Amino acid sequence: MQSKVSVIILSDNSQTRTLLKMYFDELDYVSVLEDFSDYTDIYDTLCTDDKSILVVDVSDGLEEKLNFILKVSNNIRSTRVLALSDNPSVDLIVKVMRAGAKDFLPLPLIKSEFLDIVDRINKSLYCVPKNGSKCKIISVFSNKGGIGKTSIATNLALELAQISKEKVALIDLNFQLGDITTFMELKPSFDISYMLQNLDRINDEFLLSTLERYKQTNLFVLADPPYFKQADDIKPVQIVKLFNILKETFSYIVVDAEASFDAKNIAALTESDLIFLVTVANLPALRNSQRCLELFDKLGFDKNKIQILLNRYMENDEISEEDVENVIGRKIYWKIPNNYFTMMSAINKGIPVCVLNPNSNVANCYKNLAINLTDNIYRDNLMKNYENILGGN
Ligand SMILES: Nc1ncnc2c1ncn2[C@@H]1O[C@H](COP(=O)(O)OP(=O)(O)OP(=O)(O)O)[C@@H](O)[C@H]1O
Ligand SMILES: [Mg+2]
């Protein structure tokens, strides 16, 4: 027989507490735990529980409760947080979800909705979550070499893993001369060609043991093949298959794409939800970006799928931000400051700048880009999932 799921209710409102307790008492698979002295007491109890649901009413004491949700979701994998609020604005829901709550309901509760969500949470506590179509593929691309793709892909992937607390895969599609393993000082036992030879036997367990986990983070790296010949044997259709398999396990796939329009690379870009086209403020790079955009247009890519990252940005550059936008005919999505010394030092040490120098302007910029992305994705999902809840908000 399965053990019961422990439930802890955290609300400043006694009526909400009583009502929740009443609803939970109707479910024979949960057991509500009560009489806690403080947050530490609750935290310690959750740490010892096999499976638990923490219900947090964030209508009052928002900051304190967000910090607690963050601590629990960062450290206790067996607890799932359900947040409630009597003021369900999009901003608030994004905040609680970013802190780590996986579910949200507005107050006052609608009993059927509440029981539905608890049932879903209960099931999810018993099985490994599958992300399926929720996964976002983000490719970092430029048709010019040496522009900052690997620096961006590596740091963005790492920040996405930290911020979203979900599993992120970082894939090196530079089949001839990949750099990710050097940038992160990794010596993976397996590479992409091994993975492609074993497509038929891949499952969650195989993936997580074959991809190289970066330290104790949620980031898993798939390196380029060590021999040129192996790269030649890879077919575009295999890349698509690989992505489809990875999508089942990972919430984000970040691709360090090759600076070419080779068929494998085009297949990867076609599969991507978002392409960051990286450029810098000099004429050859901008002309190249212009040509890339024309080609993407011919390939029928949605305009919104391609966003411009201006790397090595300097305020007093001879070519201004406005000039860049005029030449390529697109708005800049994100600017990454020029900081050669810090970036070079990180690369030479084999430690991503987000880890080596998290307070540097570049590291902060990568982090804010990841926050911006996760926020937008949460917002999109929210709009799909909670349209009826948010009503006029
Ligand atoms: N924001 C930045 N400020 C200053 N220098 C940077 C910045 N980003 C990257 N660089 C430098 O640019 C060089 C190329 O970076 P990186 O290897 O990430 O580019 P790439 O596009 O992946 O290159 P390749 O085409 O060889 O794969 C490195 O020396 C790196 O230190
Ligand atoms: Mg590179």
Image: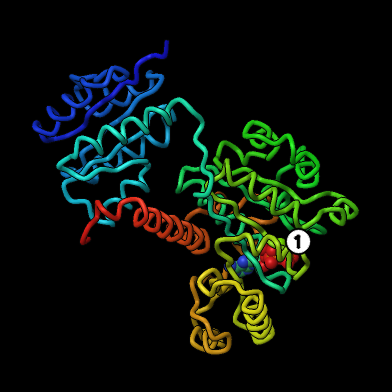
Q: Quadrant of residue 179?
A: bottom right
Viewer-side residue, 173 vs 116: 116
In this view, 370 is above or below 101? below
**Residue 340 visible, this angle:** no
Q: Amino acid at mark 1?
A: Lys
Q: Residue furthest left?
A: 15
**Residue 279 visible, this angle:** yes
Viewer-side residue, 337 vs 288: 288
Q: Position of residue 226 (x, y in %)?
A: 84, 49
Q: Residue furthest front?
A: 112
Q: Identify the residue at image location x=17%, y=34%.
A: 11
Q: Determine the secondary structure under disc 1.
A: helix
Q: Residue furthest top?
A: 1
In this view, 147 is above or below 327? above
Mark 1 is surrounded, within 10 Å at the Cα level, by few (under 14), some (14 to 19) or many (20 or more) other residues, namely many
Q: Position of residue 163 (x, y in %)?
A: 45, 48
Which quadrant is home to the N terminus?
top left
Q: Identify the residue at image location x=22%, y=51%.
A: 88
In this view, 283 is above or below 30? below
Viewer-side residue, 102 vs 282: 102
Q: Quadrant of residue 209?
A: top right
Viewer-side residue, 6 vs 22: 22
Q: Which residue is mark 1?
A: 264
Q: Position of residue 170 (x, y in %)?
A: 63, 50
Q: Position of residue 385 (x, y in %)?
A: 35, 51
Locate residue 280 relative to residue 330 in the image: left or right. right
Q: Quadrant of ligand 1?
A: bottom right
In this view, 392 is above or below 126? below
